[in-house]
């Protein structure tokens, strides 16, 4: 899967499923501080990523993921 496709799918579910304002979505956006993603949202993200990308997020692998760009990198490393 190409990076552009990953970014588009992530953007789509952030807007549609988590109701994040489109103008807040930028590669350097901080997941918690800028996008307002909390622990309950993260549970939804785990389910969505599994459905859309076909792998399970391991919480311990997400400890260093702070920005949207890093989150996209993480997905890309899994679906490569």
Image: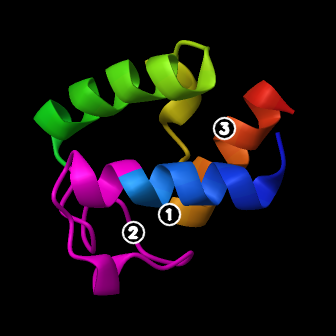
Q: Which mark is residue 78?
A: none
Sequence-first disc among 1 and 2: 2
Which residue is under mark 3?
Answer: 75
Residue in view at x 45 percent, y 60 percent: 11
Q: Is residue 13 visible?
A: yes
Sequence-first disc among 2 and 3: 2
Local SS, label 2: loop
Q: Nearer the viewer, mark 3 or mark 1?
A: 3
Q: Is the Cβ of the residue at disc 1 closer than 8 Å to that at disc 2?
A: yes
Q: Magenta segment: does it hold 16?
A: yes
Q: Nearer the viewer, mark 2 or mark 3?
A: 3
Q: Is the Cβ of the residue at disc 3 closer than 8 Å to that at disc 1?
A: no
- The residue carrying pointer 3 sits among few (fewer than 14), some (14 to 19) or many (20 or more) residues within 10 Å by Cα, namely many
Residue in view at x 26 percent, y 67 percent: 35
Q: Which mark is residue 67?
A: 1
Closer to us: 15 or 44: 15
- The residue carrying pointer 1 sits among few (fewer than 14), some (14 to 19) or many (20 or more) residues within 10 Å by Cα, namely some
Q: Position of residue 58 (x, y in %)?
A: 52, 16
Q: Is residue 66 visible?
A: no
Closer to us: 60 or 69: 69
Q: Relative to 1, does residue 78 appear above or below in the rendering?
A: above
Question: Which residues are drawn in magenta?
Answer: 13-37
Magenta stretch, main secondary structure class: loop
User: Alpha-carbon distance for marks 2 and 3?
Assistant: 16 Å
- The residue carrying pointer 2 sits among few (fewer than 14), some (14 to 19) or many (20 or more) residues within 10 Å by Cα, namely many
Which residue is under mark 2?
Answer: 30
Residue in view at x 61 percent, y 58 percent: 7
């Amino acid at each position: 899967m190409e990076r552009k496709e990953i970014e588009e799918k992530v953007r789509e579910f952030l807007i549609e499923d988590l109701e994040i304002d489109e103008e807040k979505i930028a590669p350097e956006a901080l997941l918690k501080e800028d996008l307002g993603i909390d622990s309950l949202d993260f549970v939804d993200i785990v389910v969505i990523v599994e459905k859309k990308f076909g792998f399970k997020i391991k919480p311990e692998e997400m400890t260093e993921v702070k920005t949207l760009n890093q989150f996209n990198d993480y997905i890309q490393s899994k679906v490569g």
